[in-house]
Amino acid sequence: MNAKNFIKTLGYTPKDNCVGVYQKCYPQANGYCVEVDFENKSFNYGELISAESKTTQNFSQAENWVVLECVDRLLEKGYKPKNITLEKTYPSGHGHSGRLDICVSHDDGSEYLLIECKTWGKEFDKEFARMKKDGGQLFTYFKFSNKADVIMLYASDLNKNKIVYRNEIVKIEDDYRSGDVKDFFDKWNQLTKDNGIFDSWVNPYQFTSKALTLNLLEPIKQEDSGFIFNRFLEILRHNVVSDKPNAFNKKPSPEGPVFQ
């Protein structure tokens, strides 16, 4: 990826009287500015966006550009800089700690949205597969406080002079807050949303996901069929449907609804 083309596409422009420094100021945040310094190979997120580590504030990792773009999208959407924390640190035992890329909080400091950023393609797919296997990093981070309303795996990239992004979102239900990570994962239906945070119909802090539209539908791939079949069997077991070959022919029972 050409980094300068990337930030120019985001709307960054050269800063006056500075060599190699680009900036973008956000009218949604009272003119708050973020800078990219190519001379020092660093990102300057200003005084209001807090950071509990400096790991994502340099050019050392490709993932850091995804963090920059995600912060840009948050600010464009209207989230306040003071409510954004980078690399929020959680204790994970044995002298180690885990760092969430982006945490968006309410004005009272309570967590609203947890975002884990990955580079487009292989790294994103790897973490998404892990998420569907045992919950991955995001489920663990959520369980440290149980307060967030939404968790999201995020990636973005520059594709033919256009920024594209992908997000896999889990809306937190009340029963997800009890128990540990395994309990959370067992209660989750392993389905994610791909809209509801950054879309035009959504206001900050008001997650609103819409059903699929025709232009969003994609052909079913061979690798998807096993997952769909297993989920279907789980629904049948949950509804105590033993006659699986004829499940779709079943009519509602007078005693209550039966899967059909």
Image (cartoon, rainbow, N blue to C red):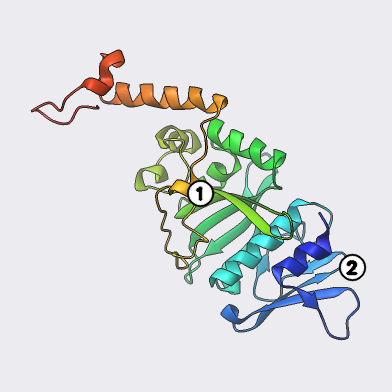
Classify 10 Å Cα crowding around label 2: few (below 14), some (14-19), many (20 and above). Answer: few
The kind of secondary structure element at disc 2 is: loop
Which of disc 1 and disc 2 is earlier in sequence? 2
Residue 88 in sight in this render = no
Q: Which residue is mark 1?
A: 194
Q: Nearer the viewer, residue 2 or 29?
A: 2
Is 47 left, or right, of 151 in this rendering? right
Q: Position of residue 174 (x, y in %)?
A: 35, 48
Q: Position of residue 94 (x, y in %)?
A: 68, 39
Please report the residue visible at 20 percent of the width from the left and 22 percent of the height from the top: 250
Looking at the image, residue 253 lies above or below residue 150: above
Looking at the image, residue 249 lies above or below residue 18: above
Kind of residue sitting beneath label 1: Asp
Please report the residue visible at 57 percent of the width from the left and 45 percent of the height from the top: 138
Is 13 left, or right, of 28 in this rendering? right
Q: Position of residue 87 (x, y in %)?
A: 67, 57
- Specify the label residue 40 is tagged with: 2
Please report the residue visible at 44 percent of the width from the left and 65 percent of the height from the top: 201
Is 46 left, or right, of 244 in this rendering? right
Q: CA distance from mark 2 to mark 1?
A: 36 Å
The kind of secondary structure element at disc 1 is: loop
Please report the residue visible at 71 percent of the width from the left and 72 percent of the height from the top: 11
For this orientation, the residue located farthest to the left is 254
For this orientation, the residue located farthest to the front is 215
